[in-house]
Image: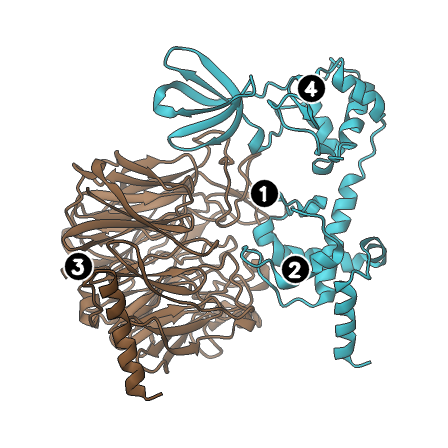
Chain colours: A cyan, B brown
């Protein structure tokens, strides 16, 4: 087989998905992953960021893409780019691109591996009962829209991040989940989740789940406010917290 | 086909179009003398930042600080493109020329926004700029338009017909070269540089004969073996040291010098692979316009490890300097420092941070910065942010107020880790990818980091006023003789500020990011101001 033929066969194999992701991942060596990491940092991190999470909706380090992706899909995208987006094609070989994919898959696998000594079924009871989490949060069709929607939170956050959000809710708040408070001319105050703001206006989802838009010149005061999320340290036992984390980690949107 | 027949058809076509639209606009020859003295015909906008001085100043006075509140939208032209719209249009005698990204040229009726023709160009798939498939506009000479392309070609296009005249490869896109900036016209030459300097290129500036496309001279931004400055690159790093050119140059007729700002050295973050000052990265180079010979240079950021491209447009002005009129170059740099240089000699006259800047604590007598912050394995907090105090978006200088107007990012920092992509500083002070759309600014309060338009007195570099935005900005600035400053930002507003106080006088919600600078022109005595935002071009005038 000539090299050219081999490449064509390999390309055809990729195109029809003959290299399933799980099989390939097991064949990557540590050196391949290191190569992949280097290539990622040199080529991809410029736009995607060092953790691969800089572009909204895409978190390469946690295996989150805008649609489901096989390894072959990803290799194809790395090599060909995505038309009409800033994602450019590259001159990488299939092998080089595969190493980047392997690195990203390994990263995602590592991050999901946080062991939680909790029980999801019990966590769900705490979530709906003692924790009163649904007062602000929504899972599927149930709960409030005021806080972050948790329907897919298990795909988006590591268990350690979830645990920290329960015990230290103000420690790291995603920019899209920040709380904002405005005071109108008549003295009435509105607090809610900040959806957008600019030099002249602000848009929030208020505590009654209403979309509200304000012109800043009409306001007496406006600005960021502390998160209304309480710390559950002391309110829930360590076991209950672990159970809630296990429940949240199981939420994958299905 | 008989060449005469073809020519006749090409000449006839725009006439038919013009008559069909009920217009009398016609293409006239744009001589180099007209370009050089663009201020003598303020109804036109003949080069990227108005004239080769790059002051981005319109002498038109119909729209003033007193009446700007009445400004009304006249037309919108929507690009059939989802790429960022960074181009500044040209206007020649009622006809507007701009670029639909990546590389389609369009001719519009400047009074109505209606199209005459579109020249469609499909760049080779290898054309892949690091940071967006963008273009910042065309140049014109005679009745020919010139465009650099993202696959590193330079194309001459007939301004009447939209037909290509010649197309040359400035560089090979397979080697990761690209072109995104507006060419500079000097006499009978088209001068353009190669981008791609975040990758392993060796950048250069080249001049082409405007008639034939034949290369006249070439200046490498990284000196080769035996050339002065070569010793500022360790080992073989000079071969792949980057130093792209991706913003418009300037020209000074008295000295016959062209000026270009140069890009960062590559690899961007790992200076260990290219020890030394890395000349002429992050510099301004002054080249003889006829030969391309280097006359002087000034390096703003020696041995850059933070992607502080000096690809801002050089702004040339004559200002009173310590009691006498001096021909200077004003430069608000990505590295956070504002500079005044003597543009005849390159002498460093003054440098002063214009945003929060901590990487230097002063200069030696020749203007070399004394650097005090370095990337470390654990990370060092450095201001400004990796995307800089400003970036490519052009500033403005008003000869009327004597002030220099700059749109910038204030208070943004980055954690520089040795050999790695710089990390975000602070919990929500995240990096933002170029041109990325963020509905909600990342910062936790409006003082943590923000976009701002500021006015400076170039004689002292003292700040005269500022206008803050909530979000950061990739928009440039236009100054006009009506005592106005126009700007915008990622929030999607187009703003008119009082040039003397910075007060907001008028705004328009343009529904998309402003990633370009405004320009102004007039048709039949009516002054327009045009701005690209989102994927559209907007034109405003008084009722």
The residue identified by callout 1 is A56
Q: Position of residue B312 (x, y in %)?
A: 37, 56
The residue identified by callout 3 is B39
Depth check: give the residue in front, B452 or B356: B452
Asked if labels 3 and 1 touch by Cβ distance under 8 angstroms, the answer is: no
Task: Give neighbour class at mark 2: few <14, some 14-19, many 20+ (Cα, 10 Å).
Answer: many
Q: Distance between the residues labelled 1 and 4?
A: 26 Å
Asked if labels 2 and 1 touch by Cβ distance under 8 angstroms, the answer is: no
Q: Position of residue A161 (x, y in %)?
A: 71, 32
- Residue placed farthest to the bottom in the image? B2
Q: Where is residue A36 in the image (x, y as percent from the top left)?
A: 72, 58
Asked if labels 2 and 3 touch by Cβ distance under 8 angstroms, the answer is: no
Label 3 element class: helix
* Discs 4 and 3 share one subunit: no
Choose top left, top right, bottom left or bottom right for residue A122: top right
The residue identified by callout 4 is A134
Label 4 vs label 2, nearer the camera: 4
Label 1 vs label 3, nearer the camera: 1
């Amino acid at each position: 087989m000539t090299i050219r033929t081999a490449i064509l066969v390999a390309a055809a194999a990729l195109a029809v998905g003959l290299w399933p992701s799980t099989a390939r991942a097991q064949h990557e060596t540590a050196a391949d992953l290191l190569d992949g990491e280097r290539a990622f940092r040199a080529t991809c991190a410029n736009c995607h960021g060092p953790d691969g999470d800089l572009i909204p909706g895409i978190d390469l380090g946690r295996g989150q893409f805008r649609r489901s992706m096989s390894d072959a899909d990803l290799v194809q995208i790395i090599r060909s780019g995505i038309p009409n987006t800033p994602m450019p094609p590259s001159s990488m070989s299939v092998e080089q691109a595969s190493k980047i994919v392997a690195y990203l898959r390994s990263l995602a696998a590592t991050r999901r591996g946080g062991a939680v000594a909790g029980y999801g079924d019990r966590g769900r009871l705490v979530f709906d009962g003692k924790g009163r989490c649904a007062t602000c949060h929504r899972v599927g069709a149930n709960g409030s829209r005021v806080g972050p929607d948790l329907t897919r939170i298990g795909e988006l956050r590591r268990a350690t991040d979830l645990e920290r959000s329960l015990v230290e809710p103000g420690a790291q708040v995603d920019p899209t989940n920040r709380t904002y408070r405005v005071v109108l001319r008549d003295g009435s105050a509105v607090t809610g989740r900040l959806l957008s703001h600019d030099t002249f206006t602000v848009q929030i989802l208020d505590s009654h789940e209403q979309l509200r838009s304000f012109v800043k010149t009409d306001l007496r005061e406006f600005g960021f406010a502390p998160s209304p999320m309480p710390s559950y340290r002391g309110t829930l036992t360590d076991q209950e917290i672990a159970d809630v984390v296990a429940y949240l980690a199981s939420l994958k949107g299905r | 086909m008989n060449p005469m027949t073809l020519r006749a058809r090409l000449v006839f076509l725009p006439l038919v179009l013009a008559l069909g639209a009920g217009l009398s606009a016609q293409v006239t020859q744009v001589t180099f003398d007209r370009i050089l003295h663009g201020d003598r015909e303020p109804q036109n906008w003949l080069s990227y930042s108005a004239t080769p001085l790059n002051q981005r100043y319109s002498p038109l006075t119909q729209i003033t600080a007193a009446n700007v509140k009445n400004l009304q939208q006249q037309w919108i032209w929507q690009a059939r493109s989802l790429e960022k719209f960074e181009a500044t249009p040209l206007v020649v005698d009622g006809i507007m020329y701009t670029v639909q990204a990546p590389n389609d040229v369009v001719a519009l009726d400047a009074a109505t926004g209606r199209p005459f023709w579109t020249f469609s160009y499909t760049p080779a798939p290898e054309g892949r700029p690091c940071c967006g498939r963008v273009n910042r506009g065309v140049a014109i000479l005679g009745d020919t338009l010139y465009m650099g392309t993202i696959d590193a070609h330079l194309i001459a296009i007939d301004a009447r017909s939209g037909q290509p005249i010649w197309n040359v490869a400035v560089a090979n896109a397979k080697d990761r070269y690209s072109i995104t900036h507006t060419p500079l016209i000097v006499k009978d030459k088209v001068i353009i540089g190669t981008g791609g300097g975040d990758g392993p290129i060796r950048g250069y500036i080249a001049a082409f004969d405007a008639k034939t496309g034949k290369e006249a001279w070439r200046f490498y931004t990284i000196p080769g073996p035996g050339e002065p400055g070569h010793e500022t690159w360790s080992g073989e790093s000079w071969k792949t040291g980057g130093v792209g050119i991706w913003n418009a140059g300037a020209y000074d007729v008295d000295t016959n010098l062209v000026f270009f700002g140069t890009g960062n050295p590559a690899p961007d973050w790992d200076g260990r692979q290219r020890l030394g000052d890395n000349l002429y990265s992050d510099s301004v180079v002054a080249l003889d316009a006829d030969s391309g010979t280097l006359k002087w240079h000034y390096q703003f950021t020696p041995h850059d490890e933070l992607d502080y491209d000096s690809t801002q447009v050089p702004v040339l002005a004559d200002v009173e300097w310590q009691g006498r009129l001096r021909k200077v170059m004003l430069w608000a740099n990505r590295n956070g420092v504002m500079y005044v240089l003597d543009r005849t000699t390159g002498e460093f006259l003054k440098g002063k941070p214009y945003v929060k800047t901590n990487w230097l604590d002063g200069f030696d007598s020749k203007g070399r910065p004394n650097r005090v912050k370095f990337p470390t394995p654990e990370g060092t907090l450095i201001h400004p942010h990796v995307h800089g105090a400003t970036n490519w978006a052009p500033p403005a200088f008003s000869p009327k107020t004597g002030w220099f107007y700059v749109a910038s990012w204030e208070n943004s920092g980055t954690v520089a880790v040795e050999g790695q992509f710089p990390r975000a500083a602070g919990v929500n002070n995240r990096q933002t990818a170029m041109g990325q759309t963020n509905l909600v600014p990342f910062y936790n309060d409006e003082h943590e980091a923000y976009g701002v338009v500021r006015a400076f007195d170039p004689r002292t570099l003292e700040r005269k006023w500022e206008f803050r935005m909530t979000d950061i900005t990739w928009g440039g600035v236009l100054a006009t003789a009506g005592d106005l400053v126009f700007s915008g930002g990622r929030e999607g507003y187009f703003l008119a500020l009082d040039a003397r106080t910075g007060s907001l006088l008028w705004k328009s919600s343009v529904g998309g990011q402003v990633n370009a600078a405004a320009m102004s022109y007039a048709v039949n005595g009516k002054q327009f101001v045009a701005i690209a935002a989102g994927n559209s071009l907007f034109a405003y005038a008084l009722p």
